[in-house]
Image (spheres, helix red, strand yellow):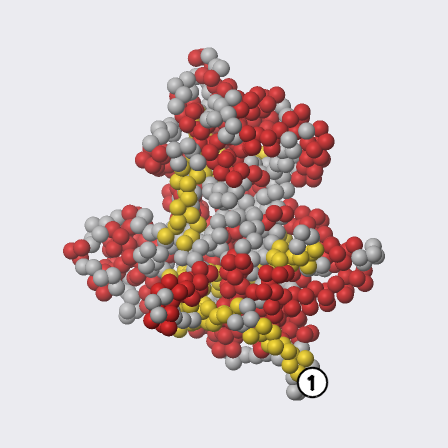
Amino acid sequence: VENLLSPYLGSDFKNLQKQIVYHLEHTLPRNTKTFQSFGTYLATSYTIRDRLLQLSHDTQKYYNEKKVKQACYISIEYLMGRFLRNAVLNLNLEEKYEQALAGFGYALEDIYDEEQDPALGNGGLGRLAACFLDTLATHNYPAWGYGLRYNYGLFRQSIGSEGEQVEKTDVWLQFPYPFMVENHFLRIPIGFYGSIETYVDEKTKGTRFKWHPSEYVIAQANDILIPGYGTDNTNTLRLWSCRPIEELDFDKFSLGDFKGASENRLNAENITNVLYPNDNEVAGKELRFKQQYFLVAATLHDIIRRLKEQKRTIYELPDFAAVQLNDTHPTLAIPELLRILLDEEMLTWEEAWDITQRTFSYTNHTILPEALERWPVKLISHLLPRHMQLIEAINWKFLEKVRKIDKNNGELTKKMSLIENSWDTLVRMAWLAIVGSHKVNGVSGIHTNILKNIVFQDFHSFYPNKFVNVTNGVTPRRWLHACNPKLSELITSTLKSNDWIYDLAHLSKLREYAENEDFQLKWAAIKTFNKRKLQAYVKKELKIDIGCDGVIYDIQIKRIHEYKRQLMNVLASIHFYLKIKKMSKEEKTKVQKRVSFIAGKAAPGYLVAKKIIKLINRVSNVINNDPEIGDLFKVVYLPNYSVTLAELLIPATDVSEHISTPGCEASGTSNMKFVLNGGLILGTLDGANLEIMENSGEENVFAFGITSKEVPQVKQRNIEQGAWNLMPEELQSILGIIEEGKFGEADEFRGLLEELKGVDRYITGHDFIPYIKELENVMSTYQKPHKWWKMSILGCAGSGWLSSDRTIKEYAEKIWGIKPCPLPKIE
Ligand code: 26V
């Protein structure tokens, strides 16, 4: 870095100071007299941006010279988290920046806190994309991320006086975001609506089609540069924002129609205005569909433009780029590429289809039926007539082959058709993504098996080599090295090397320290240090006093969803609350103290999830203010869960809960982050929990409940006999207490409880007792520190495999066919 950047950007701390002052005075503009924290943060960030711009320029130049194949990750969400600390650490400039800022009277740590957390995603899927970008850069893979630059990210959550979720717009671009560079030279027209022209090709005498959109908008590139850890390679995340073709209709303006004059601009800006806050449920809105097309049309245009810049032909596209579809949201890329190849590049169908299939691959992230996208044919035909025609052609050709093996008079053909006739005629986006890709992957072992054997069973039989598993992973840079500096230091000093930061398998060497008393003490002391930080945060933000020493911090943080069973968690809290209340003074002295933390947002339209939040807050209010309970037990709901909050919570956790109904959680990724930070897992036999058990040892995970294979029987029994009749008495009486109005009006939670008493789709009643027993096991184990810390250390030692570096290596080898391309070191 040093040589590459000199003479402009020396990284001596005096140089850094000059650069910061330069930006303060020329970019902001401010001066050294009007320094404040926010300005300092901006100026500091601009100095980082300068470096990254230069590095990214060199990176692209090198990739282009080498003509290496690259991965293009298309995702409608990226949950990046704050940028500055990550960049400073990756560039190995922390000490220098600390020194530079100290000279101005600022602590770097406080400056980090000035940054907004760009929340351009909902949850697991978006955060996974962000971990992948970090790994791709760190391991020198030629790769691009493509996404949308929403004006407003995921809503900010607060809790109202009744305990309810309150949503506020996330205005994250009020001030410039210094890490995002508007690329003014890259503006791409994107069409919508219109008609299809049919004509005869003079040369081949074949029929050709041409789409004439009736409306256009402009896709404008905004680049976020992604530094790798300890490397010069710097990749790009390109986020598109939507601009109007014409800013202002001057004729309308002149006639005094001021509203009408801006209509065009507002309509266009709408497309990338807001991130849809749903996760795991389809909203079916036209604007959402427009977002999806806008993303893929701009992205493919850009990829093909870059291919041609290398003077290569369209036939080389599959050797130039491997395009990964992050869930079905970017599936329109398939008909869009086909359209370009057929209508603009004039290829034959066979050529075009071959290139398309070789270019794309698709990752599935959920099997919940309500999250599988299906779009009305009517909507697609209106918005994208040519694409609808192509989807029909793909389907026709595909079903021709299916019919040949369909022995059951059309049953299979109907099931596999990309177009479904139910309440409406709908395009099944997952089917389209499978047919148009050469590889389809699930995100954990169990999830991929469910895809192969249940959800996409027919497709798996039809394409036996298409389905592969790539278990998720997380970046150890953000999720250990940056968020838990003390643990990072301990690991580095113990292993006498920091190689683990980019090769996490080295953590296995910690195994030999698992029972070492001295090491255990150091390990535990770091946990306490991190817990104190959280304790202070809870005091400051929520005015709640919680203990720390000898208190278990038990955490469940994730989107609020019925299948994730936060409801079961809060019902168990009521159970323990009632239990403590019945205890004698003597018995109370033996209680293991615990704080149960819950955080997570509910989709604004998901009323059941919002009710769960309300119940948690009501329960928390009663328990925390009951003098008979005191500091024995607390329930804390932390509002506005975010990547930044996760960075505080995860290092401070003793035990985290991953208690989804088996078969429902595709993978889960926070489970991996906790293990990495020495937290233990209380979980069901679901998603990546299973693989964590395999790698860290079953005996180091608090697992309970049945396997996913057993779930259908339990559900069936619920339906036949009624869940209430099968529910343990213990839980029945808890429901009774809620109904009596102990936690608010009696009617308030009726709907929630009716579901539990009726069908209980997520088998809470069935799992309640095993869950509570396992929680008790957690608490009694905590009273045996030697055993607890041994489990904690072994968990971490076995987590090498959970790195997104391992995940990306698998994608690169099994799916993309790309190789690392490190920039040469300049001597
Ligand atoms: C689906 C939908 C449906 C349409 C509306 C918006 C929307 C947004 C996202 C999704 C995809 C599923 C949501 C998701 O984040 N899945 C999670 O992916 C993680 C990464 O693979 C995985 O660890 C979680 O288990 C899975 O729930």
Q: Position of residue 531 (x, y in %)?
A: 39, 35
Image point (62%, 36%), residue name: 762
Question: Is any part of residue 608 visible from this angle?
Answer: yes
Residue 416, image quadrant: bottom right
Indicate whether 213 appears above or below 408.
Answer: below
Q: Which residue is mark 1?
A: 205
Instruction: Residue at the far front: name it.
Output: 255
Q: Position of residue 821 (x, y in %)?
A: 49, 67
Q: Quadrant of the N terminus?
A: bottom left
Task: Assess disc 1: are there few (<14), some (14-19) or many (≥20) residues with their C-alpha within 10 Å of its C-alpha.
Answer: few
Question: Is any part of residue 519 visible from this angle?
Answer: no
Q: Position of residue 227 (x, y in %)?
A: 41, 60
Looking at the picture, tell me which residue is in the foreground, 640 or 650.
640
Image point (46%, 61%), residue name: 271
Image point (70%, 55%), residue name: 421
Looking at the picture, tell me which residue is in the foreground, 362 or 468.
362
Residue 621, image quadrant: top left
Q: Quadrant of the C terminus?
A: bottom left
Mark 1 sits near ligand 1, with its Cβ under 8 Å away: no
Could you say whether the residue bearing mark 1 is in a helix, strand or loop? loop
The amino acid pointed to by label 1 is Lys
Image point (50%, 75%), residue name: 305
Q: Is residue 280 left or right of residue 35?
A: right
Looking at the picture, tell me which residue is in the foreground, 201 or 503.
201
- Number of marks: 1
Q: Is residue 672 left or right of residue 815?
A: left
Residue 90, image quadrant: bottom left
Instruction: Residue at the far left: name it.
Output: 33
Q: Position of residue 75 (x, y in %)?
A: 52, 58
